[in-house]
Each structure stands twice: as C-alpha cells, then as structure tokens.
Amino acid sequence: MQSIIDIQQLTKQYGDGHLALDNVSAQIGAGEIIALLGPNGAGKTTLISIICGLTTISTGAVSIDGYDVVRDYRRTRSMIGLVPQELMLEPFETVLGTVKLSRGLFGQKPSPAYIEKILRQLSLWERRNTQIRELSGGMKRRVLIAKALSHEPKVLFLDEPTAGVDVDMRRETWKVIKDLKKRGVTIVLTTHYIEEAEEIADRIAVINGGKILLIEEKTELIKRLGTKQLWIDINRPITKVPLSLSGLDIQIENTGMRLIYKYDASMEQVDVTSVLAALTEEGVSIIDVHTYQSSLEDIFVGLVAEEST
Ligand SMILES: Nc1ncnc2c1ncn2[C@@H]1O[C@H](COP(=O)(O)OP(=O)(O)O)[C@@H](O)[C@H]1O
Ligand SMILES: [Mg+2]
C-alpha cells in the first residue's frame, strides 16, 4: 500500500497549555478507509484539522503526497475534501448551485460532467434543483459530501459522520462511504462508535488522550487481540474438567451441562477434536457446539481499561 498522508511526530499544544496530540506518527495509505477511533476529547478533530491546514502545528510535520501541509498549504488543501461534523449549508441555495460554487472556491474549472457524476453517485441528481432547506437530514449530509468532493480531492475526511444520526441514516452513510472507496477515494473518518469502525474501516487507529494506542488492519486486530470460545453442550452434568484437558482454559457452566473453552483467535490450529474426544471418553454425549469470536467492542474496552490501570 502506497502512503498518501505521512504524519511525523506530531504534537499539538493549545494556547491554554493543553496537550491535545502527543507525538503522533502514522501513514495513511492510498485507497484505504481508515477510522480514527477514540472517545470525546481524544484529539481526533485536532488531528484532522491539522492535516487540513485549519489548525497550527506545535512540533512535527504532516505531508500529503509529498507536500508539506504548512509550506504547501494551497496545494495540499486542494487534494483534500473535508466533511465537517456540523451541517453548515446555505438554506436557499440549490443542491447543484452549492456544489458548483464549492468547486469554484477551490479554483477548479467548471466540470458539469464531473458534478453530475458525483451527484448521481450520491443519489442527489434528481434533486439537483431543490433548495437545501427542503431536503431531509440524510440528503443534507450527502450534499456536504458532494461539496467536499466537488474539487476532485484525493482524500476525503469525514469528522464524526454519524454522530447523533439515527440508525437508518447511519447505515445509508456507511453505504455511501463504501461506494466512494470503490471509486478510488481514500477515506479518513473519525468516530467514537466502535461499531462504525468495525463496519466500514480497513484499518483502525485507536486514539486516546492525544496518543495513538495502536494502528492496525481491522481483521488482524481482531485476530491478534480477540479470543474465540467454543461452547459445548452435553447431555449430563459433569463436575470436573476431564484430566486430559486440564492444560486448557475450560470452564464448566450451566450447572455442569456446558463447557466453555477459550482460545486465542490467532491460533492457527486449535485441537477441537481432542476436546470433543476427551469428553466422549468421559462417557458424555455432545448435544450442541457453537463458536463465538470476540468483537472489536470487547477488544477496545480491554485496551482502554488497560490504559487506565
Ligand atoms: N481550540 C481549542 N483550545 C483549547 N483546547 C482545545 C481546543 N480544541 C480542542 N481542545 C481540547 O483538545 C482535546 C482534544 O479535542 P478534539 O481534538 O476536539 O477531540 P475529539 O475530536 O477526539 O473529541 C480536548 O481536551 C479539547 O478540549
Ligand atoms: Mg471531534
């Protein structure tokens, strides 16, 4: 994966002395969806504001496609589309008008074909002559995305795209984001919803107290830190784990009728058959077997808890 954004030892101290970013380094790859996941106050908005050139850097550097965001501000800003958290739109402007205007503000020549393409992608083309004030909340959010894409940026930033948004609109927004990725846009989004990161991100950066705690492929993260459980329901109660299985993490539950075997999700081979064979040897029959994989939520809660001990 070729990186498009390079963040080097970035620190941000606000005027009041508050350290909002503490030595953050990261690379963001071209074409990926990366989620900056962290609680309120973690430093997510500060980080994207710096990348977009809206907030000053205390120490460190950020470059986009090799261009420094401070020295080459105009150039880097033109490579970026930003969808802010707040719905800021002109109520009396039309959909098409506002998106065209946005493109013009970035000094791009008019391109009716490109604007039509993005409005169609976002299912706004039929409503292009409608005034913004007449649109639903979901459509307004899509207009913001269209505006952010109007000047053909390489990277789209979405700051908390679904904060305070209902479930249907959240799902709709996720679909729009996934579609944009398919069309080659690199996407950086911030969220405090674990479910959101789990649903749409290729990579997840967990940020807390201005520090990046980890940055990793989502599937790797779940594999590495997650655990799996094998639940085995048996036909008669047992009181002890069979001796031949004493080395494994097995608990007896459901008044002896269920065994729960926990193992690392990263283990390539887990000897499930020997567990089942040992039980058969004990003379119990197996009624049912299930596996469970821990979610990103379980992992995240564990990480933040570890951090605070
Ligand atoms: N303009 C500012 N002046 C002083 N402190 C700020 C300013 N903006 C944000 N902060 C502080 O920096 C920290 C990170 O804020 P922010 O980047 O908005 O976090 P997030 O987006 O993850 O909720 C918070 O403690 C916040 O109060
Ligand atoms: Mg924020």
Image (spheres, rainbow, N blue to C red):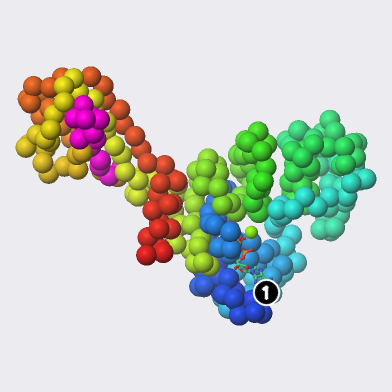
- Farthest front residue in view: 255
Q: Is residue 89 above or below residue 213?
A: above
Residue 237 percent coordinates (x, y):
16, 26
Viewer can see residue 135: yes
Quick check: 94 above or below 253?
below
Locate ligand 2 by image quadrant.
Answer: bottom right
Residue 98 on image: x %, y %: 87, 47
Q: Is residue 254 magenta?
A: yes
- The magenta segment is 252-265
At label 1, the amino acid type is: Thr
Q: Is residue 137 left or right of residue 156?
A: right
Relative image position of residue 54 (x, y in whole percent): 72, 67
Where 300 falls versus 242 (above or below)? below
Q: Residue at x 6, y 37 (%)?
A: 243
In this rendered view, identify the residue nearer to me: 208 or 96: 208
The quadrant in which the C terminus is found is bottom left
What kind of element bears circle 1?
Answer: loop
Residue 106 lies within the magenta run:
no
Which quadrant would residue 142 be assigned to in this image? top right
The residue under label 1 is: 56
For image coordinates 70% across by 67% down, the residue present is 53
Other-residue count near label 1 (Cα within 10 Å), few / some / many at <14 / 14–19 / ≥20: some
Res 51 visible? no
Q: Position of residue 292 (x, y in %)?
A: 34, 34
